[in-house]
Image: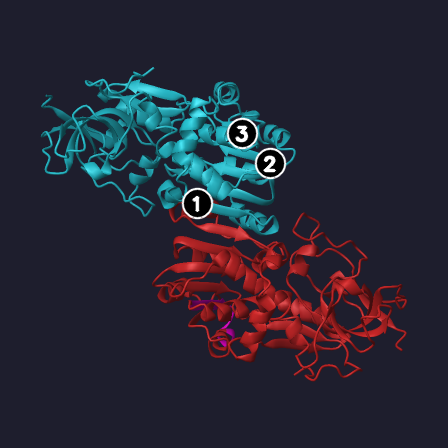
Chain colours: A red, B cyan
């Protein structure tokens, strides 16, 4: 049994774009478990943009991190000790264990996953990331066949899934991403109908070219000036899914001085619905999510791409890289190899 | 039979706040009617803010007026000649006849109203104004008992009804209006729980005092900086009904330079739903509107206040006065007296 429990804790609130000094690595005592608990060894960590929100000292949908607090996050882990008769050593579970080697978890908060699926997929399409794409698009976006669905952050973990689900529902899908290389992946691997880079000087004109029938659904992961450009193409009765605003999370400059009044004008004139959500608000209303997504993965209608890092020391770089837009697909960190052999697919 | 048909037409597009020069009065030939049509004499005209939108040369939910075009609008009229056997001379109808003495109307576009109700009420609570308040609040606002409903333009035609319907549904209702006198009317006649004047220097602080439990539903008739102030109090899952933006219709200065990004941040963090609508989009889904509203009026649970002008020459002043916020309740112009005696209630 390992006796070393490395942790990454919150060191200081960053101003603007964070760097590594926001975090501190430390060693903590091995957790001990009581009845009904599991000792879990982290195998893979999910790296998510919302963590940046928790680094602010202001109200958000998630409580702020306290200085010195363990960084929270979801991961796939292996049970190394069990005090619940329903779990065996070697079981593979999805938990919210945070950025550490070992976590003590109530078994009721663990989700056991079956052997034979890729570990990373349980943090991607079959996890919170996939549920976010699925429920946000279906509940708020209400996509209809033939409509144009525009997705910002199209190469990202959520956006790449949203576009693929939109294709399944018959939409014409337009992505917005941060480079030509990402756009190529969005087209070739994720099967979008079009993709434009917001970093191109003529982004607005390119977007107009690919939104000739207007935009019926906008799934927004980024906010800021990109979203204001998309707003020009909203059709009457368009639905705007406000899922993320990653361009704004570090307190960047405002988009446009007259933009709020103009945006409200569009909401009224085009009778838009703009709704923010987090997946936990509505996931319970979509019990078919997991079975739908597994079927789509098996049928090859959803492709999952990992942006994988290896090793505990790469957790912070993975997070900073994701904020800088370096990832294509889901950012994951493979922290340790499994000891037991319940799952077949090792990390790619 | 009158042979004179006065009309008010659109003379020129105003920049900023309109004045009388935007309009021109003229005399037109008496309309003639064909089979299935009615010749209607205007009795009462409904004066509505959305007309200001039609004076712009830009896309809105309603087509722009052309220069020289008759000003459109709803009214109550008396049938003076009928070529539909289902209608008699003397019938009272609600029509979209525009700003003129006489209009030729297809009978299928006329709604006959019963004797015994006030003519003005058919342009207020029982007309498009009432339907706007009712369907906007129920469909988008989804008010729940005990929630705080904030209504801007609370002394106006729609806002005064929204607050009263909110009370029927058990909300605590906070109004925002443009003077202390209006606030008094909102409290005493319309029965709101609180009302604050946005013209007061400490409006923000007053609003905070009356929104201590936050705002669950915001019914917005005005937009601009007032709405940004309300946004500070939105609760999680608040619904924002974007019904009107009268503060912006004449192209006023932008609200706040950083406001769009901040507003989108609130939409996400508090999981807001912001939706624009016009009544014709959704009225068909609410067949109970007229019977509900009639019952509420009979029971005295809804009180209707008219801001009445008299005479054709006061149509333009009534409109300009409404844009300047002079009205409390529904702005109407009584253009002519009825000849036939189907309805009992003369204008108050």
On residue B167, the disc is 3
Tally of numbered tags: 3
* Dot placed on the residue nearer the N-terminal end, 1 or 2: 2
- Element marked by disc 3: helix
Q: Which span of residues is magenta-colored?
A: A172-182
Chain letter for mark 2: B
How far across and down, in percent of the image, does residue A244 sit? 57, 58
Alpha carbon separation for disc pair 1 and 2:
21 Å
| Residue A125 is at least partly visible in this image | yes
The outermost residue toward the front is B85
How far across and down, in percent of the image, does residue B268 sit? 58, 52
Q: What residue sits 55% from the left and 37% below the top?
A: B230
Taking depth in this image into account, of B20 and A101 the one nearest to the observer is A101
- Element marked by disc 1: strand
- Are dots 3 and 2 on a single chain? yes
On residue B147, the disc is 2
**Residue beneath label 1, please?**
B276
On residue A180, the disc is none
Q: Quadrant of residue B216?
A: top right
């Amino acid at each position: 049994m390992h006796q070393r429990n490395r942790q990454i804790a919150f060191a200081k609130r960053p101003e603007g774009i964070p760097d590594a000094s926001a975090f501190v690595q430390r060693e903590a005592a091995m957790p001990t478990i009581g009845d009904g608990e599991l000792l879990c060894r982290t195998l893979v960590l999910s790296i998510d943009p919302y963590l940046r929100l928790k680094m602010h000292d202001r109200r958000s949908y998630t409580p702020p991190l306290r200085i010195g607090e363990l960084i929270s996050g979801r991961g796939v882990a292996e049970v190394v000790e069990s005090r619940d008769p329903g779990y065996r050593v070697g079981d593979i579970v999805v938990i919210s264990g945070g950025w550490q080697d070992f976590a003590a978890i109530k078994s009721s908060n663990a989700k056991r996953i079956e052997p034979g699926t890729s570990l990373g997929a349980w943090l991607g399409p079959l996890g919170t990331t996939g549920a976010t794409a699925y429920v946000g698009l279906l509940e708020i976006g209400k996509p209809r066949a033939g409509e144009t669905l525009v997705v910002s952050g199209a190469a990202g973990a959520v956006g790449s899934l949203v576009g693929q689900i939109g294709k399944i529902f018959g939409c014409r899908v337009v992505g917005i991403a941060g480079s030509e290389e990402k756009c190529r992946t969005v087209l070739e691997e994720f099967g979008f109908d079009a993709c434009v880079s917001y970093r191109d000087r003529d982004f607005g004109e390119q977007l107009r070219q690919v939104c000739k029938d207007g935009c019926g659904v906008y799934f927004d992961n980024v906010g800021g000036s990109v979203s204001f450009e998309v707003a020009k193409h909203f059709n009457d009765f368009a639905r705007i899914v406000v899922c993320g605003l990653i361009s704004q999370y570090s307190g960047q400059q405002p988009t446009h001085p007259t933009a709020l009044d103009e945006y409200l004008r569009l909401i009224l004139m085009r009778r838009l619905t703009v709704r923010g959500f987090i997946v936990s608000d509505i996931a319970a209303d979509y019990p078919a999510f997991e079975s739908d997504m597994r079927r789509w993965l098996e049928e090859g209608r959803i492709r999952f791409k990992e942006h994988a890092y290896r090793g505990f020391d790469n957790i912070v770089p993975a997070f900073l890289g994701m904020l800088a837009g370096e990832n294509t697909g889901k950012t994951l960190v493979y922290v340790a190899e499994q000891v037991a052999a319940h799952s077949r697919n090792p990390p790619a």
